[in-house]
Image (cartoon, rainbow, N blue to C red):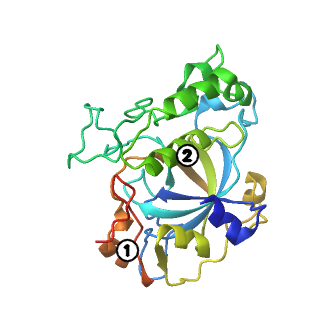
Amino acid sequence: MTQAAKDDWGNASPFNYAIVGHDPDTVLDQNGTSGTRSCCQCYQLVYDVPNEAEAQVNGNSSGASAVAVPAPLIVQAFNTSAGGGQNFDVYMGAGGFGGNNACDPNFTQQPSASGEYLYTAFTEVGESGNGGEKAAILTPCRTSENLVTSATLSSTSCQGQVHSDCSEITATGAGVASETIQSCVASNDPSSFYHLNWKVYAKKVACPTHLTEVTGCELEPDGAPAANPAVTTAAEAAADSTFLSGYTTTTMQDCCKPTCAWQDNVKSAGTAIGEYNSFYSCNQAGAPVTE
């Protein structure tokens, strides 16, 4: 994802890339007379303030964020049942199981329906229902008043706990484990704390070329504009009428095959380009699933 963003926008890319669960929204996802759809659609998300009170400045009437506001994301929808059409469920290492768990074979409170798991061991912090390995819920990452700030997130004890928890992840495929650990740690970085629930501005955009090459899903153009690199802050998004407010992010990783990895679901969302007709997925060893 990091390399794809640089390939599309240069080494100083104003965006990071991600995939999200997103349900069709009657405003954001309206597509002429064909109704609403979300599979494989792309969006520009501009972060505003945390959607969790403990991460905002206590007593500040402006409601300013007490933690660094992350850079905007360009995201592609890969899953549904994601909290409603005004929410984007951002996929990241140990992002939280939600309603399903095919990650952790040892989390007996929420067994996999198939009996299959992606990992051989997994961090159980924040499971189930508290957002997974989220620094904001860790005691070393909070003040004595239970608030989360850039200073508490940056503390050695906080980041040490994050690294320790994330390093509990193991898998049959070494690459699967190492990439998940990297994502788990990076999403809790104090300078770009994506592993938090945020309020965001959202706009449907055309999918960038290298993002779809990573995900494996691309639809025929439907008139959505390119992402706007001049809109990277909440103030800029608020001044641009093409961006819509009232949207939020949550986080997830449930390790299940996502909605948009099924070709029939992609067909209902639009016409795929060539064989870019579903999201890539993989098995426990990291081998791509091709059938």
Can you tell which quarter of the image residue 65 is in?
top right
Task: Please state which amino acid type lies under the numbered disc 2.
Answer: Ser
Locate residue 64, reporting x and y percent.
74, 37
78 sits to left or right of 144: left
The residue beneath circle 2 is 183
> Furthest-top residue in view?
144
1 sits to left or right of 116: right
Residue name at image x 59 percent, y 43 percent: 187
Question: Can you say which quadrant of the picture contains the N terminus?
Answer: bottom right
Task: Judge depth for marks 2 and 1 and give the one in front.
Answer: 2
Q: Nearer the viewer, residue 129 or 121?
A: 121
Question: Can you say which quadrant of the picture contains the C terminus?
Answer: bottom left
The residue beneath circle 1 is 266
Residue name at image x 79 percent, y 61 percent: 12
Q: Is mark 1 on a helix, strand or loop?
A: helix
Q: Nearer the viewer, residue 103 or 34?
A: 103
Sooner in the amino-acid sequence: mark 2 or mark 1: 2
Locate residue 260, reporting x and y percent.
38, 66
Task: Please state which amino acid type lies under the numbered disc 1.
Answer: Val
Residue name at image x 28 percent, y 37 percent: 105
Residue 110 drawn above or below residue 82:
above
Q: Nearer the viewer, residue 230 or 239?
A: 230
